[in-house]
Image: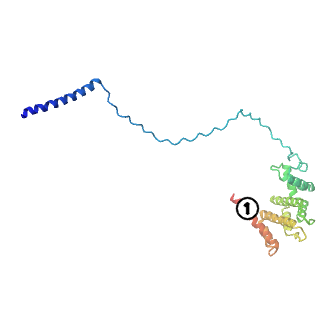
Amino acid sequence: MDRKFASKHLLFPFLAALLLGFAVIFFALWTDVPMPAPAPEQPRVTARPPEQPARPLSPQPATAPLPLEPSRPVVVSDPLETDTTPPLLAKPRSPLDSLRQRVMVAHPDIAQFRQLQRKVLLKPQEKEMLRDMYKDRELIEAAKQDLLAADEETFTEEGQFKRLYRVEYLGMGLEWKENPERETLLKTVEEVILAKNIQSEQGLDLRRSLSGDKVELFMVMLYNDRKRAEELLASVQGTDLEKLLKYSMLRYDALWAIADKK
């Protein structure tokens, strides 16, 4: 076959296919057929912590709260001791008050001392009355006799309470440095400490109480005249009293060491 004739036969099918392709494109553009759009991208969701269950609300009162009552003064049913109330007439408010009152009734001088000594601010005449008691030799001797407890064989709370106030009276009298009877007070304290008034026939509780009085009186001496107290301690070396007074000194020094740290 002739080469020219064969090329013409191949050209026609090629042109026909090309025209057909242009016709499809032209038809698609002419009819404005929408092309399928790509699927939209899914938005990213951040992970959230699990929700906590809601707390139940506290129940509200069904009715509004009542208004507060106006303040009222506090009423004390028991009468309190005042400057105008004699201590022997004050109504006891506890077993300790009853005990104290029995001692005051039996010893009016102790009642007067307590009434004056416990006041924070003394009037000039009251201060003079208290100083008169500190230099009263009869009161000093009465304190000595009560502390010796020569007529006591068994322990009583009244007796111990009485001696407690006698020790306080002697100590307060010594703290008044200008007391003209200060030497008498010191000598009385020494005599009570040195007295052999603790006997085996006495009850154990009474012996302990009298020993405690000696301890307290020696501490009074240490506070008011330590040099004299140390001389008294040296004079009883080798006796049972030495042990008691050494214990008193250790206790006194320990209490002051604690007080200095505060």
The residue lying toward the viewer, choosing from 237 and 163, is 163
Image coordinates of residue 51 in percent, x first then y, are 54, 41
Task: Give 27 or 12, whichever is nearer the viewer.
Answer: 12
For this orientation, the residue located farthest to the front is 1
Which residue is located at x 18 percent, y 29 percent? 16
Q: Is the N terminus in the top left, top right, bottom left or bottom right quadrant?
A: top left
Residue 103 lies, with reference to residue 70, above or below; the image says below
Give the residue at x 13% y 31%: 11
Residue 42 is left or right of residue 78, and the answer is left
Q: Is residue 238 above or below residue 149?
A: below
Give how far across and how far down residue 15 sits, in percent.
16, 29
Q: How many marks?
A: 1
Query: Please, is residue 84 above or below residue 237 in the view?
Result: above
In the image, taking residue 3 as reference, residue 222 lies left or right, namely right
The residue pinned by badge 1 equals: 256
- Coordinates of residue 72 in the picture (x, y in percent): 79, 37
Residue 106, x across and y down, in percent = 93, 56
Q: Identity of the amino acid at label 1?
A: Trp
Q: In terms of image quadrants, where is residue 237?
A: bottom right
How is this picture coloured?
A: rainbow
Q: Quadrant of the C terminus?
A: bottom right
Q: Secondary structure at mark 1?
A: helix
